[in-house]
Image: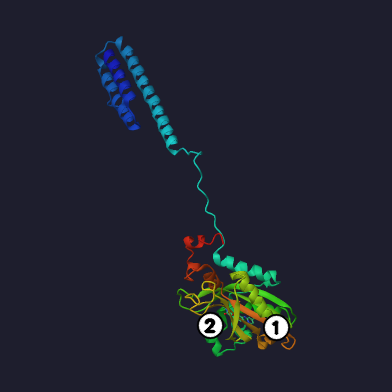
C-alpha cells in the first residue's frame, strides 16, 4: 500500500504539471482526491492491515492528499497568472504610436458668404438686424405695400400657419420692424440676413428654404445715386475690381422706382457665353427706392425721408462666385462638398 500511495502521488504530480487549463486540473482533482478517487480506493483496503500499520498508512495517505492538494493550488495560481499576463499583453496600448489627427470643422460656405457681405456693409456704417422666421401677415406683406388680395402676393407662394401667421417669405419684415422702432426718426442703416421660406418644388435652382440678405438705408436726402454707388462697391468687393454693373428697370411692390442689378460676366468678359446666356451680363440682385407707402406705414414722413433698399440671395452669389451648379449642395451637407471651401 505504501508503494501504491507513492505511485499515486507521482502520477498525480505529473498530471498536474502537464495540465494547461482549469478544467484539466479539476479532472485531476476528482480522479485522485474525489469520493471514488484513487486515494479512497487505497483506504478501502485498510481493514486488512494490522493495528500497528493502520495509523502509518493513514498518515501517509493524508500527506499524499495534502501534497496533491497543494500542487493543485499552486498550479491553479500559475495558470491564472499566465492568463492575466497574456491578457495584459494583448490589450496593451503602444503609447508611442502616432495619434489620429482630429477632424477640424469650419463655417459653412453660405455662412462665409453672408459674413463677407455683412463685413462690407458694417464697414459702411450699417448694423446687422435680425427678426422672427414665423412672421405676421402684416409685417411680411401688408407693411411692405402688399395688401391682402394684391396680385403681387402671387410672386411668393407661402407657407401659412394660420390666417395671420406664416413662415416669412423674405427678410423685409425685419426692416419694416426696425423702421417702426425708430419712431419716424432717421437715419436707419441696416443689413438683414436670414432664412426665408417659399412653397417651391426643390430642384437645382429652387429650394423651399433659402437665405436672403436685404439692406435698407433711410434718411433725409437719400437718392438713387447713393443706391448705385453702394451697389457698385458691393459688386467690386465680391466679384472683383474689374467688374462693371448695370441697372435695369424692374418691379417690386415695396420700391418705386425698382431696378435689377447685373454684373459684367467674368467668364466671357462681356462677349456672351453659357453662364451669362449670351448677354454678357449676370443678374445679381433687386433694389429700388423705398415706396412712400412703406415709409408712411412704418411711421416715417415720406415728404422728409427717403431711402433705398436691396435684396439678394447668398446662394446665388455663392453659386456664381464658386461655380456651384446645384443649390441643394448647400443643404445636404456632404462633407466632401463643404470641405472644398474651407480655405475661402
Ligand atoms: C430680390 C429683391 C428686394 C427689397 C428687397 C425692401 C425692404 C423694405 C422696403 C423696401 Cl423694408 N424694399 N426690400 C427691395 C427691393 C428688392 O429684393 O430680388 N431679392 C432676392
The total number of labels drawn is 2
Quadrant assignment for the N terminus: top left
Cβ at disc 2 under 8 Å from ligand 1: no
Q: Is residue 85 above or below residue 252?
A: above
| 299 with respect to 43 (left or right) | right
Comparing 281 with 139, the one in front is 281
Q: Earlier in the sequence, mark 2 or mark 1?
A: 2
Q: Quadrant of residue 243?
A: bottom right
SS class, disc 1: loop
On the question of residue 171 being in view, the answer is: no
SS class, disc 2: loop
Give percent across and percent down for residue 300.
72, 85
Quadrant assignment for the C terminus: bottom right
Residue depicted at x 48% and y 63%: 337
Disc number lying in front (2 or 1): 1
Q: In which quarter of the image is residue 301?
A: bottom right
Disc 1: CA contacts within 10 A as few (<14), some (14-19) or many (>=20): some
In the picture, the disc for residue 156 is 2
Residue depicted at x 48% and y 38%: 94
Q: Is residue 113 above or below residue 99?
A: below
Comparing 25 with 327, the one in front is 327
Residue depicted at x 73% and y 84%: 305
Amino acid at each position: 500500500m505504501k508503494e501504491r500511495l507513492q505511485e499515486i502521488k507521482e502520477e498525480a504530480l505529473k498530471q498536474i504539471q502537464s495540465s494547461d487549463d482549469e478544467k484539466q486540473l479539476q479532472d485531476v482533482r476528482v480522479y485522485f482526491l474525489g469520493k471514488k478517487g484513487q486515494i479512497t480506493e487505497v483506504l478501502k483496503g485498510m481493514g486488512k492491515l494490522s493495528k500497528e500499520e493502520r495509523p502509518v498508512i493513514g498518515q501517509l495517505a493524508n500527506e499524499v492528499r495534502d501534497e496533491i492538494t497543494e500542487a493543485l493550488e499552486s498550479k491553479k495560481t500559475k495558470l491564472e497568472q499566465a492568463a492575466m499576463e497574456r491578457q495584459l499583453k494583448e490589450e496593451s496600448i503602444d503609447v508611442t504610436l502616432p495619434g489620429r489627427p482630429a477632424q477640424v470643422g469650419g463655417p459653412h460656405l453660405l455662412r462665409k458668404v453672408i459674413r463677407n457681405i455683412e463685413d462690407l456693409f458694417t464697414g459702411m456704417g450699417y448694423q446687422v438686424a435680425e427678426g422672427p422666421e414665423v412672421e405676421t401677415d402684416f409685417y411680411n406683406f401688408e407693411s411692405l405695400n402688399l395688401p391682402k388680395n394684391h396680385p403681387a402676393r402671387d410672386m411668393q407662394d407661402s407657407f401659412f400657419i394660420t390666417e395671420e401667421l406664416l413662415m416669412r417669405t423674405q427678410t423685409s419684415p425685419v426692416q419694416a420692424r426696425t423702421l417702426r422702432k425708430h419712431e419716424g426718426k432717421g437715419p436707419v442703416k441696416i443689413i438683414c440676413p436670414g432664412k426665408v421660406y417659399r412653397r417651391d418644388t426643390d430642384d437645382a435652382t429652387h429650394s423651399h428654404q433659402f437665405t436672403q440678405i436685404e439692406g435698407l438705408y433711410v434718411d433725409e436726402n437719400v437718392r438713387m445715386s447713393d443706391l448705385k454707388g453702394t451697389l457698385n462697391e458691393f459688386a467690386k468687393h465680391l466679384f472683383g475690381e474689374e467688374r462693371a454693373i448695370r441697372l435695369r428697370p424692374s418691379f417690386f411692390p415695396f420700391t418705386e422706382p425698382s431696378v435689377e442689378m447685373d454684373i459684367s460676366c467674368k467668364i466671357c468678359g462681356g462677349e456672351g457665353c453659357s453662364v451669362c446666356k449670351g448677354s454678357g451680363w449676370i443678374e445679381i440682385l433687386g433694389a429700388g427706392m423705398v415706396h412712400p407707402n412703406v415709409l408712411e406705414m412704418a411711421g416715417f414722413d415720406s415728404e422728409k425721408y427717403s431711402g433705398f433698399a436691396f435684396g439678394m440671395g447668398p446662394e446665388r452669389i455663392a453659386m456664381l462666385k464658386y461655380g456651384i451648379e446645384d443649390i441643394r449642395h448647400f443643404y445636404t451637407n456632404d462633407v466632401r462638398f463643404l470641405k472644398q471651401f474651407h480655405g475661402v
